[in-house]
Amino acid sequence: MDTPPNSQLALTQSEAVLDAVEGPHSPGSGSERLWREDMAHFVHPFTHFDSFKKRGSLILTEAKGAYIFDSNGKRYLDGIGGLWCMSIGFGEEEMVAAIAEQVRRLSFYSAFVNMTNAPAVDLAAELARLKKAVAELAAGVQVDEQRLALEIALMADRVDITEELVRLRTHLAACGEALASDGAVGKQLGFLAQELLREVNTIGSKANDAGITQTVITMKGELEKFREQLDNLE
């Protein structure tokens, strides 16, 4: 199938830049077979095949957060979120656990012939509830659904505390490791207490939820106790 002229131009320009900057892709150690067999057998959509024959594919091996890594360990910012489907980031443990739990229970079944399942029904019901709530708030005013979705996404991004929670868990784990060690850890724990307080304050400023606000207040109190106890450590 022929590529549309505008798309062809964009592909040509993109590949020209990549050729100039990177040259042929160099597969990492142990990835040479994948690189060769990908060129020989795998059909890539939306690809400039003249350049592909010269450069081959960039072999991706892992991802974390907003970054992907190739077979040489080089890190890239994944600006499009996979294919606009990884906006929460890669490797989020909460998502991993939720997917694993659902796969163990029921990995898939079609909705054909009067079949259904709980997650599908819950999602459909929640979408209907949200749509009804928006209609009530609009009070008869015509709402552009695409614009509304964009505004909701922007608002969700402003109140999202995922990154803060990830850093909070990291700092807590570091505190546990420091307390389990035999060396002098007072200064290290003091620094970690400051970082913990920074993340807690940020969560408090972002969250528009009474439950989270109460939790933040409790955490601040516990952190104050922790910092007082640090005065007795070297």
Image (cartoon, rainbow, N blue to C red):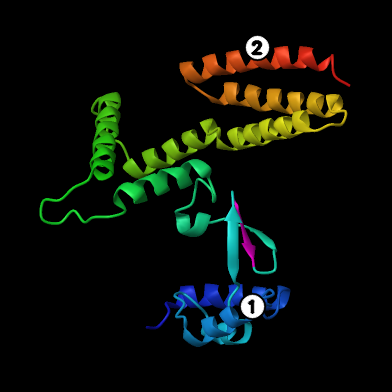
Numbered tag placed on residue 119 in the rendering: none
Q: Is residue 104 left or right of residue 118?
A: right
Which quadrant, please, contains the C terminus? top right
Q: Which residue is mark 1?
A: 16
Secondary structure state at the residue bearing disc 2 = helix
Furthest residue toward left: 113
Q: Amino acid at mark 2?
A: Gly
Q: Which residue is mark 2?
A: 221
Q: Is residue 18 above or below residue 67?
A: below
Q: Position of residue 48 (x, y in %)?
A: 52, 80
Q: Amino acid at mark 1?
A: Ala
Q: Would residue 67 be counted in the magenta stretch?
A: yes
Which residue is at the front of the view, 184 or 118?
Answer: 184
- Region of the chain picked out in magenta, as a range: 66-70
Q: Is residue 233 above or below residue 30?
A: above
Secondary structure state at the residue bearing disc 1 = helix
At horizontal 74% and vertical 24% (from top left) the residue drawn is 193
Quarter occupied by residue 10: bottom right
Q: Would residue 134 be counted in the magenta stretch?
A: no
At horizontal 28% and vertical 28% (from top left) the residue drawn is 133
